[in-house]
Image (tube, coloured by chain):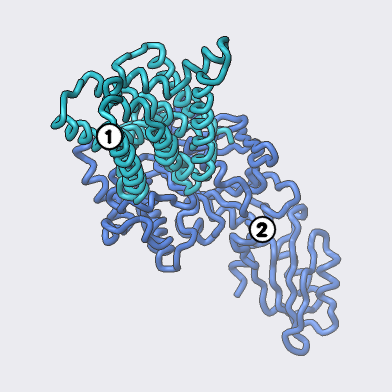
Amino acid sequence: MSGLFPIFRREMLSLWVTPLAWVLVTVFLLLQGISYALVVRHLAAAPAVSVDAGPVQAYFGQSVFLIISLLLLCPGLTMRVFAEERRSGTIESLLTAPVTPAAVVLGKYLAVLVTYALMWAPTVLYVVILRNTGGIDWHVVGTCYLGVLAIGAGYLALGVLMSSLTRSQLVAFLLTVAIEFGLFIFGIGEYIFDPGFWLDLSTHVSVFSQMDELSKGIVDLRRLTFDGSLIALPLFVTARVVDSWRWG
Amino acid sequence: MIEVEGLTKDYGTVLALRGLSFRVGVGEVVGFVGPNGAGKSTTLRILAGYLGQTAGKVRIGGHDLETASLAVRRLIGYMPETSPLYPELRVREYLTFRAALKQVPRRERCRAIARAMELAAVEAEADTLTGHLSRGFRQRVGLADALLASPPLLILDEPTAGLDPNQIREVRRVIRELGREHTILLSTHILSEVETTCDRALVVSRGRLVGEGPIEELREQRRGRRVRLVLRDTAGAAAELLGAREGVRVLERSVLEPGVVRLELRIERSSEGVEAEALLACLVAAGIGVRELSPIRASLEDVFATLTQAPNGVQREPSLPADDSAAATADGSGS
């Protein structure tokens, strides 16, 4: 796996010295802040509702804002990773260095994953602030963050794959949004389909249900396995795609 | 150092390389020349491990490129044609990244970067963003990158493309200097570059090797085959007389002053017996005064044009042409 760490470091540097990461983090935190403020204000106005779900549960498990911001944030982070290298030609010097395709893919992926995690980090402050007003179940907070990390990691892996399929960042972005949005919409099928195969499938895929469960502290291994597949499969295919460029 | 056999690359719609074979020995500086689209970059990209070949064998430093690609890439410092860089990184940051990628040990990294920057003369721009560099400096950063791990083999794809004359001279000087320690394969379509920097040239055209040999030898291949004569000839008898000889063709006749003409002859390869001496004897016997006889030295450009403009590529010439002796004689008696 030679070359993984230098590639990871170069990606991190490139992400954070250009405006892209800062623009994304600003928009993302703005959306999250609004979402969280709305949840807290709503629950403050109707204390009876919070018996079922506290602000943490409502924010992570019942807010569509969270999913939508993931649908935009993840493709934004991944769109340039390969598309830009291929457009500018830097991929040639990268692949003629003694590095394996797997190291290239993982180095880049880890960089966007760590950046994604860093973007979420400030939101821990919301919970810390909330602690002053009442008790916090830190286990639930932990499972909630596990959820956003697992779902985001899958979305990022899909984005990395899409970025390897085109030289255009815009096309990579749109392809990733289309697929992730498709998965999200298919997940909503759990409220629409009649009992049967499609209902089962859409329930398994549903991001909404997964976040709802995790926000109640329920960790379902099947869902984590699905997330794991959504990470491993696209990354494996990306490594094959990178290798296939030699035969172009 | 490099052994290439039957290298073929098919892009699907274009057959870029058609059974290319050549060898480059350790310590040689070899120029890979050919017109645009001849397959130079494709070959270098295959050697550098960026592209895969459709057929053929490549061995570099004793390793098979297909089965030991990583080992081969460790031996090579490759400079792509366009020297693509990450515009958001400073020159030093970029070279540090490349050094880490090439597994230059951490302790030696600073020294290796300083040496590469010195050789490529980019120290003054060490803290400049690569996105702000001029084309010439980008090329030099590409060269510094290729030199980072002190690889035994340097593959440089058009290292002087887009540089100004001073920069070209500087880069050629660096290449000559590097040639003392490294094996170098560089591609170019500028022949003077090959003449000034390389020991040997490989001429490719349409994906085939059409000429190969030391620079002098390549030039010699065409030397002496064209001869210039200045004669005292009023009636045009000389042209007629020479034109009638087997294997001699009069290419051009011009009158320099009344009664004095200049002829340019081409001596065909097939008539090996024709020599300057025989021509002179024939002219003198006919009572024609010879004022000057000199071989027209073919430039490398002429050789290049002859080799690469043949419809399907000319086969390599096995040996020096026999009419070389005529040239040698003419050299002595010429102007």
Under mark 1, the amino acid is: Ala
**Residue at 80% across / 78% down in the picture?**
B287
**Residue at 41% across / 12% down in the picture?**
A222
Residues indicated by labels 2 and 1 sit on the same polypeptide chain: no
Q: Chain of mark 1?
A: A
**x%, y% of residue A96?**
44, 38
Q: Chain of mark 2?
A: B
Disc 1, SS: helix
Above/below status of B90 relative to B334: above
Q: Which residue is mark 2?
A: B305
Left or right: A65, with A169 as reference point: left
Hue used for the chain lettered A: cyan
- Crowding near pointer 1: few (<14 within 10 Å), some, many (20+)? few
Above/below status of B303 relative to B20: below
Under mark 2, the amino acid is: Ala
Disc 2, SS: helix
B158 and B194: which is toward the camera: B158
Quadrant of image for the N terminus of chain A:
top left
**Residue at 36% across / 17% down in the picture?**
A213
Hue used for the chain lettered B: blue
**x%, y% of residue B96?**
28, 44
- Crowding near pointer 2: few (<14 within 10 Å), some, many (20+)? few
Which quadrant of the figure has residue A149?
Answer: top left
Residue B150 visible to an observer of this rendering: no
Distance in Å between CA atoms under marks 2 and 1: 87 Å
Q: Which residue is mark 1?
A: A45
Left or right: B8, with A54 as reference point: right
**x%, y% of residue B293?**
67, 72
Above/below status of A4 relative to A197: below
Left or right: A197, with B100 as reference point: right
